Amino acid sequence: MSKLDSVVKDIAAEMRQRPDRGTVADYIPELAHVDPNAFGLAVADAEGELACGGDADLPFSIQSISKVFTLTLALGMVGDRLWQRVGREPSGTPFNSIVQLERERGIPRNPFINAGAIAVTDVILSGHQPREALGEILRFMQFLADDPSITIDRAVAASEDRTGFRNRALANYMKSFGVLENPVDFTLGVYFHHCAIAMTCRQLALAGRFLAHQGRNPATGLSVVQPERARRINAIMLTCGHYDGSGEFAYRVGLPGKSGVGGGILAIAPGAASIAVWSPGLDASGNSHLGRIALEMLTRRMGWSIF
Ligand code: DON
């Protein structure tokens, strides 16, 4: 067994035992049914090894982690013009906050808070039918993970559609400033569905590889984005990927990371590894409680930090 494999298995075993598991999100009712005792970890390293521990093959709702991939797609479509519609500064506010939108003329602070991700989704939609835009996003995930079995959990999407009053407020508010170009219901429909993509830690670690390897998939050598773009996406993950918990994540883990309220985190060790962890219980900022602790242990034991 390699060092990486034994570290991953050790951490998964230790995380299973911990009593402090955080709180499972229930504002999307369908997410409340997830078992808080689940824990998965998968690491795809530069040598092509894929180390898995715990429930690494159980699918979970990736939620806001999808925003890394929609940002990548939108940059591919419109390049730096994207930054006319969304900023790239940390917000210091919760993921679903509305307060800055009024002061900043409807331009969201960054692509990872809900308002910013809704604006990015609107760019991807750009006049197409919601079904086509969604198909584009899903196919991109399947391509990156090299796995056509990845799907959308329709029950989770419907659950958020029924209860997403806050996101409706954010989208309508942005629409009033002319920041959204498509019908609000179209943009939100695509947004709710891409958040409801279900993936395993194994699939997510594979999908993140291009960010760890200067924009290339190390298995195929194929370029997904230019090296500079991969660096910049990583920079935004570091500064904004955990909302008002981004500073604490950088301090403790030392890597770019993106969390989701499903309890997943994608973390990138540039040049070394793409890491996916999942533990459904969240901390006060809406980020996976044990996921962050597991990443802190992993990076310390493997010597991975960008600092
Ligand atoms: O829009 C929402 O509230 C969810 N679909 C995604 C939020 C989320 O994952 C925040 N992450 N920690």
Image (cartoon, rainbow, N blue to C red):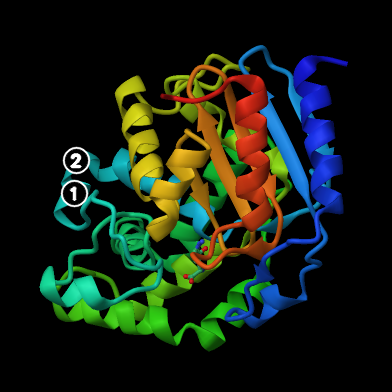
Q: Amino acid at mark 2?
A: Asp
What residue do we see at 22% from left, 49% from top?
Answer: 82
What residue do we see at 28% from left, 71% from top?
Answer: 182
Q: Quadrant of the C terminus?
A: top left
Q: Position of residue 109 (x, y in %)?
A: 24, 59
Quadrant in the rendering for residue 174:
bottom left
Quadrant in the rendering for residue 238:
top left
Element under label 1? helix
Q: Is residue 185 left or right of residue 101?
A: right
Q: Is residue 33 visible?
A: yes
Q: Amino acid at mark 1?
A: Trp
**Residue topped by disc 2:** 80
Quadrant in the rendering for residue 186:
bottom left
Per the rendering, the mark at residue 83 is: 1
* Few, some or many residues within 10 Å of mark 1 (<14, 14–19, 20+): some
Q: Quadrant of the N terminus?
A: top right
User: Between residues 184 and 258, which one lies in front from this camera angle?
Assistant: 258
Q: Are marks 2 and 1 in contact (CB under 8 Å)?
A: yes
Q: Position of residue 304 (x, y in %)?
A: 55, 23
Q: Position of residue 266 (x, y in %)?
A: 57, 43
